[in-house]
Structures are given as C-alpha cells and as structure tokens.
C-alpha cells in the first residue's frame, strides 16, 4: 500500500493562536524564539515574558509584542522593571515565576532559563498539565526522574528544543519503542577539537565562546567546548526517551548537518538533517505536532560536499567521560555534576581558573561526594548546591 500523507484539516487553519509563556526571553534561546514568533505572528500569542535581570531588554520585548505579564528572577530589580514598564503585571523572584505559570494560562511554556534555575518552573508547568518546550538541559540532568514524574502526573509533554534531542524526537515519530536499537548523538567537537592538548591549558574564555557552528548562550557554549554539553544531552535522551546509557552513543560530526540519528533493530537508521540554526528546532517545538514554513535557508548537500564522523576524544575532553560515569552511577551524582560544572564554568568565565581546570574540579567533586541519593526535588537542590560550593571552595 502506498502511504498517504495527511492533509491539513480546514478547521486547523482557523485554530486560535497558541498561548506562549517564555521563561528566559532575553537569552539566546529566548530571543530566537521571539524571532520565530515574529514570522508567525498570527499563530502565537505571547502571554508572558520572564528574564533574570535584563530589565531594559525585557521591557523592549514587552512593548514590541504587547505583553502585559513580566517576570524577573532577580526580585531586587522588580522595582526598576515597574518604572520602565509601569502598566505590566510583574512577577518577581523564583516564587513569582511559579505564580506566573498559573496566572498566564499558557498552552505552552518555553523553558529557556539558563542552567539549573529552570527546574522549579519546569516541574510546576508540567504538574499543571502545561506542555513545556525545554531548552535548558540541567533540570533533566540533575532531576530527570522528578521532571518525568511531574509530566506524567499532569498529563503534559516535554518537547525538546535542543537540536540533537529535537532530531531524535522527530526520528521517533510513528515508531515503536521496542524497535529501537540505539540512539546516536552528534557533536560538533567544539572549537578546540584539533588543538594539541598542551595548548588547551592556555585557552581563554573569549576563545571558548567562539563556537564554530552554533549561536548559543555563554554557559552552553563553554559546555560545548568541554564536551560537557554532549554528556548532558545523554541524560536528556535517557529520560525523555526512556533508554539506558548503554544504548546512547556520541559521534563527532564537525559539519553539524546531521543533528542526531536513531538505529532500529533491523539495522536501518533514520537521521534528521538541516542547517545548524536553532530557530528550526525552536519552531518545531512551538508548532508541534504541526509544521510551518520557516524563515531559514534550505539545505544544499551538494554545496556541503561531504560529511565526516569520528569517535569523541574522551581522554582529551574528560567532561564527557565524567558525565557518562555520573549517569551510570545515578543517585545524587548527576546533581553534583550539574552544580560542579556550573561553578567551574562561572569561574572560568571570570578568568579565575583555566580551561582544563573545569574537568579537574568537576571530577574532584564527583570523587568526594558521599553518594547520598536524593529522594525529593528539594534534595536535588541541596546536592546541586553542594557541588557548586565544593568547586568554589577548591578552585
């Protein structure tokens, strides 16, 4: 039988705009999300925007998109936000962001808060039955079990924005779980893949922030350079798709054209490809389960010429190996990993430690952790904080 492609129901074309709450609207993912929405203004309504402390940018976004609900993680700056956006309802501090999730009644929350700070709002949205388009990896790394349990309780879905996870998500549409053999995450290799090991000690923050293919935030760009980012993505695959670490493989693909692959038990492989532009997976998450035209150039394979693949260098970039070990150990080790990496990256960006000190400090924190297994979301926060403090104290 010839497969029949689904046609668009006329009723779908008259659906009301999807209500979007963007947590982390002033960062890299947040601003690119707004860029996607600009090109599909009739399909989305932004019901709320939240940022860390970038007041002027947040106010400018609110004026452009006519948003009346604004959130600010830094409660001390809320007064200033009231001054520059006097008509807006302001939700201040971590508790304010949680209140914002329920007060704005979104259809979809875009979780783009950098780092571990996005955990509480992600869980709150999922428990309320609101789908989350998740960009930040740390909640799933440190507290994957609690995030997935919250989604099940609320009957909500986690839709990955991360390009590699979005690729796997798309490759699995219509497939049966029992047919999956393994999942392959591609990695660009970062800007220092070909740099001799002895020269990596002298890498500066400015050099590490110059990623060769992707436009990302500062934290994730450094994590990409150390390959910690790819280790974090293994956790995302493990929790989002319910597979063991032994069935997840990382392969270096410098061109960043194939974003990930899934191999099935009949040894056929499905890959998702496209230009390295975060607006593509962002738009897929916003429009899911539908697709829309994108304001992005198409893929010209003839112009690219060739695609290459290689094994990752876990000896030269130990953060990937450390993430794998933490994932297999389970318990509190993933939360230690997240906290330690956050502190180490912050210290590196402040020029207080060197590039190769990042894996050294993260590894030391994992080695010295007592192995306590978190039994609640609060426990995860405590363990994460321990990891941060350990690295800060031992730098």
Image (cartoon, grey):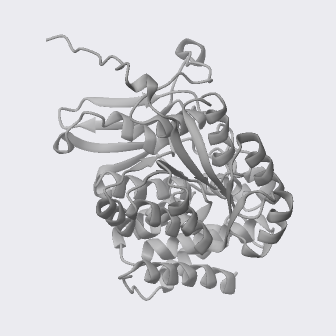
- In this rendering, position of residue 354 left or right of residue 362: right
Above or below, comparing residue 110 to residue 368 in the picture: above
Q: Position of residue 243 (x, y in %)?
A: 28, 54
User: For this rendering, which residue is in front, 9 or 375?
Assistant: 9
Q: Number of numbered discs present?
A: 0
The answer to which quarter of the image holds residue 37 is: top right
Is residue 309 in view from this perspective? no
Above or below, comparing residue 225 to residue 184 in the picture: below
Q: Position of residue 224 (x, y in %)?
A: 60, 52
Above or below, comparing residue 203 to residue 15 in the picture: below
In which quadrant of the rendered image does the C terminus lie?
bottom right
Give the residue drawn at x 56%, y 37%.
44
Give the residue drawn at x 59%, y 74%.
95
Q: Position of residue 184 (x, y in %)?
A: 38, 42
- In this rendering, position of residue 154 left or right of residue 196: left
Residue that extends furthest to the front in the rendered view of this protein: 87
In which quadrant of the rendered image does the N terminus lie?
top left
- In this rendering, position of residue 155 left or right of residue 139: left
Residue that extends furthest to the left in the rendered view of this protein: 1
- In this rendering, position of residue 185 left or right of residue 349: left
Give the residue drawn at x 25%, y 33%.
174
Is residue 347 in view from this perspective? yes
Q: Position of residue 256 (x, y in %)?
A: 55, 34
User: For this rendering, which residue is in front, 88 or 72?
Assistant: 88
The answer to which quarter of the image holds residue 169 is: top left
User: For this rendering, which residue is in front, 323 or 60?
Assistant: 60
């Amino acid at each position: 039988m010839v497969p029949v492609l689904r046609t668009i129901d006329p009723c779908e074309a008259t659906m009301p705009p999807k209500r979007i709450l963007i947590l982390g609207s002033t960062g890299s993912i947040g601003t690119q999300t707004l860029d996607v929405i600009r090109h599909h203004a009739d399909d989305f309504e932004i019901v709320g925007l939240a940022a860390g402390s970038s007041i002027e940018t947040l106010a400018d976004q609110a004026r452009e998109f006519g948003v009346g609900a604004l959130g600010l993680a830094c409660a001390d700056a809320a007064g200033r936000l009231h001054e520059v956006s006097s008509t807006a309802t302001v939700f201040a501090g971590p508790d304010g962001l949680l209140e914002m999730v329920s007060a704005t009644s979104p259809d979809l929350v875009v979780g783009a808060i950098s780092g571990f700070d996005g955990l509480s709002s992600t869980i709150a949205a999922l428990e309320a039955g609101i789908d989350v388009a998740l960009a930040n990896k740390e909640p799933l790394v440190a507290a994957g079990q609690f995030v997935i349990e919250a989604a099940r309780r609320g009957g909500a879905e986690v839709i990955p924005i991360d390009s590699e996870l979005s690729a796997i998500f798309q490759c699995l549409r219509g497939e049966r779980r029992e047919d999956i053999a393994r999942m392959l995450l591609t990695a660009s290799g970062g800007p220092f893949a070909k740099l001799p090991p002895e020269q990596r000690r002298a890498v500066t923050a400015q050099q590490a922030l110059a990623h060769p293919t992707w436009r990302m935030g500062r934290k994730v760009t450094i994590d990409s350079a150390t390959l910690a980012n790819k280790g974090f993505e293994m956790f995302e695959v493990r929790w989002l798709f319910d597979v063991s670490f032994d069935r997840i493989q990382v392969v270096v693909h410098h061109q960043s054209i194939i974003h990930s692959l899934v191999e099935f038990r009949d040894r056929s492989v499905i890959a998702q490809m496209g230009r390295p532009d975060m607006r593509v997976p962002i738009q897929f998450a916003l429009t899911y389960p539908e697709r829309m035209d994108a304001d992005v150039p198409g893929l010209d394979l003839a112009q690219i010429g060739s695609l290459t693949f290689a094994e990752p260098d876990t000896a030269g970039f130990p953060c990937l190996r450390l993430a794998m070990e933490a994932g297999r150990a389970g318990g509190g080790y993933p939360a230690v990993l997240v906290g330690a990496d956050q502190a180490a990256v912050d210290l590196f960006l402040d020029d207080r430690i060197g590039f190769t000190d990042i894996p050294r400090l993260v590894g030391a924190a994992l080695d010295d952790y007592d192995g306590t297994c978190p039994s609640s979301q609060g426990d995860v926060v405590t363990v994460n904080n321990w990891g941060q403090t350990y690295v800060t104290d031992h730098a």
